[in-house]
Amino acid sequence: MLDFAFFLASAAAIFVVVNPIGNVPFFHMLTTGYDPELKKRVIMKVVYVTLGALVLFGLFGKFIFALYGITLPAFEIAGGILLFTTSFSMLQGENPRSKATKEDADEALSKESVGIVPLGIPLFAGPGAITTVIIFFGEAKGLVDDIFVLISILITVVISYISLVYSGPLFRRMGRMGAMAFSRIEGILLAALAVQFVITGIVAVIHAI
């Protein structure tokens, strides 16, 4: 039986934590003065790095659990706490410290490399996004649910690509204040998701006792 509720939950969660719309101002700032061809190459690097990192950690997250003896409930509790700190930064209108920092931008070695660091990692595929993907793959009840999570990742990456391609018009329409308002709304949703992860993890631990 297809669990569309699981699909919708994973799609919404991954989109919120990656925050492609809210990342537009940072991309716009880093690529100011870039010619269209260079911007296109940077965008493709962001897309490939984000997709590769999320899929890789999602698929092999269970093996990491097994290697270090970590249970899914423990990871849900820890991941929920991490996501809550990220959501708190978003609610304050700040760029989450678990994502990119000014130092990350300053350390970019060339114009094109910003597509890998800090845009691809940690801005788009940051610790919060990786944690969310691993948790949903861990909660998947079969191949169909795994495919749902992969589709959710793909949807978010496609939206990220579109938002970056049209970052100029988007930034002009939204402005910095509009982007901050959007991030605050997503921060509220992310906080609720974080609390739900913690609750799910605690309930699972209690049942296992």
Image (spheres, grey):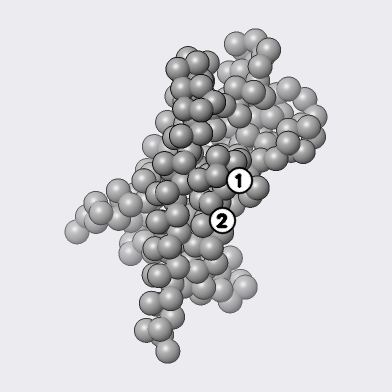
Instruction: Please name the amino acid that badge 2 sits on.
Output: Thr
Relative image position of residue 171 (x, y in whole percent): 51, 20
Disc 1 marks which residue?
Answer: 96
Q: Is residue 30 above or below residue 142?
A: above
Question: Horizontally, is 68 left or right of 189 in the view?
Answer: right
Q: Residue at x 67, y 24 (%)?
A: 30
Mark drawn on residue 19: none
Q: Residues within 10 Å of mark 1 (few under 14, many from 20)?
A: some
Quarter of the C terminus within the rendering = bottom left
Instruction: Please name the amino acid that badge 1 sits on.
Output: Pro
Quarter of the N terminus within the rendering = bottom left
Foreground residue among 7 and 163: 163
Number of residue marks: 2
Tell me if label 2 and label 1 are in contact, CB under 8 Å.
Answer: yes
Disc 2 marks which residue?
Answer: 85
Mark 2 residue element: helix
Question: Horizontally, is 118 left or right of 202 in the view?
Answer: right
Q: Quadrant of residue 205?
A: bottom left
Q: Is residue 147 visible?
A: no
